[in-house]
Image: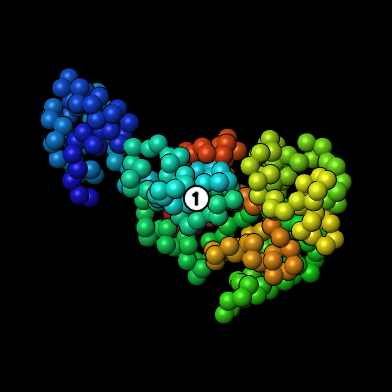
């Protein structure tokens, strides 16, 4: 790896801000390959130079990957002059190295990975590697066994080829005009296939419903049969607005969409929309093995 300044290395390992790191260096608490170093501008080569703070070795981690619970209303981009981006939600010492792996639409929430490994990101996004992405969706219209079979065979979304085979599972179909309790609308249904967890319903969900019926704002006006279907969908490619276009090809409209897993990694229950955490060592190893 290329050489970097010692103060940057220390800051990226959580020793403190650049100014705090300089105080630490002046105090003689840092050593490089066994020799006390006080100069912040000293160039070090992570992986070759042994750097210690208070006698504890700081090991360089070349691969950094974060799991973000992307909220609705936030765009998947590294920067934008007009709207909040997912990077605006990140406060990490190596933030400048990170970029989103793929994208989620403005009104879509859920699992988004950010990393600094371009080769791995490319493999994850390439259809030939068949990396699975699973979504929970609330759809206007009754999703049937015919839809399940159509998704399995591939759907014509107006491109040269059909979509790759996808796994569609029906969780529940309800009458859109039937009044449901708050508990019935809870986010626990989203993750029912993964566990019996319960989450509070995200208020952002209301913003994704599009045109509503006048009385109950349930989105029934978008469906001829007045039904609302809750489903999970697993795909292994990422065409533009793919999930929405697949349902539209079947005469239905997505009202709410949340990605709940990618490449075998499930969205952490503890992360509220807008929150993030680093992947664990085991998760990073699993990700690199799967992809």
Q: Is residue 150 left or right of residue 44?
A: right
User: Residue 71: x, y in percent?
Assistant: 56, 43
User: Residue 52: x, y in percent?
Assistant: 23, 30
Please tell me which residue is depicted at 34% across the width and 37% down the height of the picture.
Answer: 93
Q: Is residue 68 above or below residue 224?
A: above
The single residue placed furthest to the top in the displayed view is: 27
Describe the element under mark 1 as helix, strand or loop. Answer: loop
Q: Which color mode does the image show?
A: rainbow
Q: Nearer the viewer, residue 77 or 269?
A: 77
Q: Is residue 212 above or below residue 131?
A: above
Please tell me which residue is depicted at 75% across the width and 51% down the height of the picture.
Answer: 212
Please tell me which residue is depicted at 22% across the width and 50% down the height of the picture.
Answer: 1
The quadrant in which residue 199 appears is top right
The quadrant in which residue 140 appears is bottom right
Asked whether residue 41 is in view, the answer is yes
Please tell me which residue is depicted at 73% across the width and 56% down the height of the picture.
Answer: 139
Q: Which residue is mark 1?
A: 75
Residues packed near mark 1 inside 10 Å, few (<14), some (14 to 19) or many (20 plus): many
Q: Nearer the viewer, residue 106 or 51?
A: 106
């Amino acid at each position: 790896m290329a050489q970097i300044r010692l103060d940057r290395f220390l800051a990226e390992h959580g020793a403190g801000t650049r100014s705090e790191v300089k105080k630490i260096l002046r105090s003689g608490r840092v050593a490089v390959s066994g020799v006390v170093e006080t100069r912040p501008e000293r160039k070090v080569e992570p992986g070759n130079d042994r750097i210690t703070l208070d006698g504890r070795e700081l090991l360089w981690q070349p691969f950094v990957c974060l799991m973000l619970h992307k909220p609705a209303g936030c765009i998947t981009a590294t920067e934008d002059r007009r709207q909040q981006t997912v990077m605006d939600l990140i406060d990490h010492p190596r933030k400048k190295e990170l970029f989103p792996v793929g994208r989620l639409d403005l009104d879509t929430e859920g699992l988004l990975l950010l990393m600094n490994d371009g080769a791995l990101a490319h493999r994850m996004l390439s259809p030939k590697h068949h990396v699975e992405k699973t979504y929970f969706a609330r759809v206007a219209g009754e999703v049937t066994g015919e839809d399940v079979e159509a998704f399995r065979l591939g759907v014509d979304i107006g491109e040269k080829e059909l979509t790759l085979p996808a796994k569609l599972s029906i969780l529940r179909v309800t009458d859109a005009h039937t009044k449901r309790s708050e508990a019935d609308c809870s986010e626990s249904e989203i993750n029912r296939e993964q566990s019996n967890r319960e989450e509070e319903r995200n208020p952002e969900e209301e913003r994704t419903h599009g045109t509503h019926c006048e009385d109950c704002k349930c989105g029934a006006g978008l469906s001829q049969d007045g039904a609302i279907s809750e489903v999970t969908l697993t795909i292994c490619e990422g065409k533009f607005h793919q999930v929405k276009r697949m349902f539209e090809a079947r005469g239905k409209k997505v009202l709410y969409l949340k990605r709940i897993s990618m490449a075998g990694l499930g969205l952490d229950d503890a992360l509220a929309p807008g929150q993030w955490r680093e992947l664990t060592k085991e998760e990073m190893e699993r990700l690199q093995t799967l992809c």
